[in-house]
Amino acid sequence: MSTTETASATSSTASVPVIGHWVDGGHRASTSGRTAPVFNPATGAVQAEVALADQAEIDAAIASAQAGFEIWSGYSIAKRQTVLFAFRELLNARRGELAEIITAEHGKVLSDAMGEILRGQEVVELATGFPSLIKGAFSESASTGIDVYSIKQPLGVVGIISPFNFPAMVPMWFFPIAIAAGNSVVLKPSEKDPSAALWLAELWKEAGLPDGVFTVLQGDKLAVDGLLTSPLVQSISFVGSTPIAQYIYETASKHGKRVQALGGAKNHMLVLPDADLDLVADQAINAGYGAAGERCMAISVVLAVEPVADELIAKITERIAKLKIGNGAGTDGVEPDMGPLITAVHRDKVSSYVDIAEADGAEIVVDGRGFTVDGHEDGFFFGPTLLDKVPTTSRAYTEEIFGPVLSVVRVASYDEGLELINSGQFGNGTAIFTNDGGAARRFQNEVQVGMIGINVPIPVPVAYHSFGGWKQSLFGDAKAYGAHGFDFFTREKAITSRWLDPAQHGGINLGFPQN
Ligand code: NAD
């Protein structure tokens, strides 16, 4: 199974294939007449068009998911678990195919694509243990002859709307748990890299999941709005930029749905003077330029507590010079460290933030604007960029750039750095680098951020903890996966039960029941 096969299973125009939906357990060509281009970011070529669903397609996808739910929720725990284990085994054996699909549409290097699959697979593995995680509770003899117990039931059809930057991992934050708990899923992937979702759908089918339990609806705002407003859709799990996350949260809530909406980020690394600067420089490079900075947990600001800034900037600059940038597929004979950005439009937006920083008085230490790769002149490349003395009033500091741009802000003290982090609009991730345990402990207590690294630059929690930020980085009260995931995708019932012989019946009593 490859991207081409996936795409050609739907339909094709004269020049490029059209990527369609996955409904009722099979590929479905679109009849909407609306499409969007899917690029190969390394070459700049349009490699496919993706269908954008119309209302009839949205309704058909949701109706199929409702039918799938009615079948799947009736499966025993043991039968559901068998399917999950089969899915895990297939993913384990074949994930290399998925990595190639991700790289071809997203542009990230193959090893990084594999990394995102492995982090998603962790959630699949967690979900295989679902029986012990969704079992209810039982209190015998809560009152004389009365037992009280709770059961956790699936919600029904659940919607997942995902961003371009993790086309496999982000959907996998949600769907393994949703499906394990007995729900059916409609996934609306990013229109920029839509094929990973179809590959995962084929894998579910092979694992034995009944038709209609996993649906892929390709589309744009129309498809999203269809999910947000459909009375059949019970919950929405969204990951993307903050303005859209807020819109999703408000609209889905207004339509009576359970909603978790994860937004954007601006993650700071606070470097105390006692830190090991070689370790810090390595980690700043990995966390700032990995996936070309297109990670919601990327480090985009280094807060250097003086006097470390000059030495740290020298070490980061030295390392930038050694980075290899090129086609993430490694077709040039070597796997680069960093691939291109997702589109030309996004590359130009990243570039404009460097212009803004410069105009606002920042020093450009390494300039990635206008960067090209030999033989890939039309690819959407942007070179690793390092800015110093970025004014904290600049939009280049206050807004998310989502590209390979590291900004250094020099601060005089821990307190000044902490204040900057806490006054920002986002609260996704942050990290402190120090050898002082007391300072690190104070930081974890005082910082207003959802995920914190201590000498760890990208603190994405393991699957059995939960992922989510604070402030404008998460709308709603449920994080992704871990215990939050199982709570989000189940609904609890409490049952009070009494079995009595007729002789023990207490007769008529209109008083409020007491213990
Ligand atoms: P995006 O918000 O543009 O798109 C996300 C999804 O929303 C896509 O499926 C898209 O089709 C849909 N969408 C876009 N515009 C819409 C509209 N007007 N109405 C309804 N739906 C709409 O985000 P993106 O560019 O794909 O992804 C990058 C963003 O995602 C960054 O801001 C990044 O920080 C964020 N992100 C956050 C996390 C997290 O865990 N907090 C993880 C990954 C990415």
Image (cartoon, helix red, strand yellow):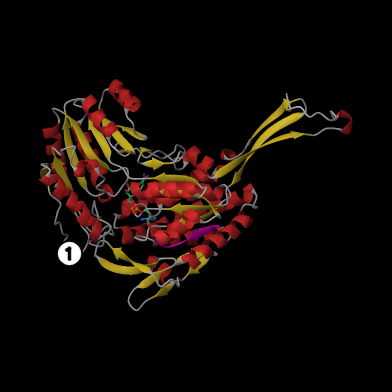
Say which amino acid is labelled 1.
Glu
Q: Does the rendering let one see residue 240?
A: no
Q: Position of residue 354 (x, y in %)?
A: 16, 48
Cβ of mark 1 under 8 A from ligand 1: no
Examine the rendered structure and indicate whether residue 202 appears above or below residue 129: below
Helix, strand or loop for the magenta stretch, by majority:
loop
Q: Position of residue 174 (x, y in %)?
A: 47, 48
Residue 74 forms part of the magenta stretch: no
User: On the image, numbered disc 1 is attached to which residue?
Assistant: 377
Q: Is residue 98 left or right of residue 433?
A: right
Find residue 30 and report its image quarter. Answer: bottom left
Position of the N terminus, as image quadrant, is: bottom left
91 vs 458, nearest the viewer: 458
246 vs 143, nearest the viewer: 246
Q: Is residue 313 left or right of residue 463?
A: left
Find residue 104 and report its image quarter. Answer: bottom left
Residue at (73%, 25%) from the top-left corner? 514
Position of the C terminus, as image quadrant, is: top right
54 vs 380, nearest the viewer: 54
Residue 213 forms part of the magenta stretch: yes
Q: Position of residue 362 (x, y in %)?
A: 12, 41
Q: Which residues are magenta?
A: 211-220
Examine the rendered structure and indicate whether residue 117 appears above or below residue 394: below
Q: Does the rendering let one see residue 393?
A: yes
Which residue occupies the extreme right position in the image? Answer: 503
Residue at (36%, 45%) from the top-left corner? 263
Examine the rendered structure and indicate whether residue 360 appears above or below residue 79: above
Q: Position of residue 437 (x, y in %)?
A: 30, 22
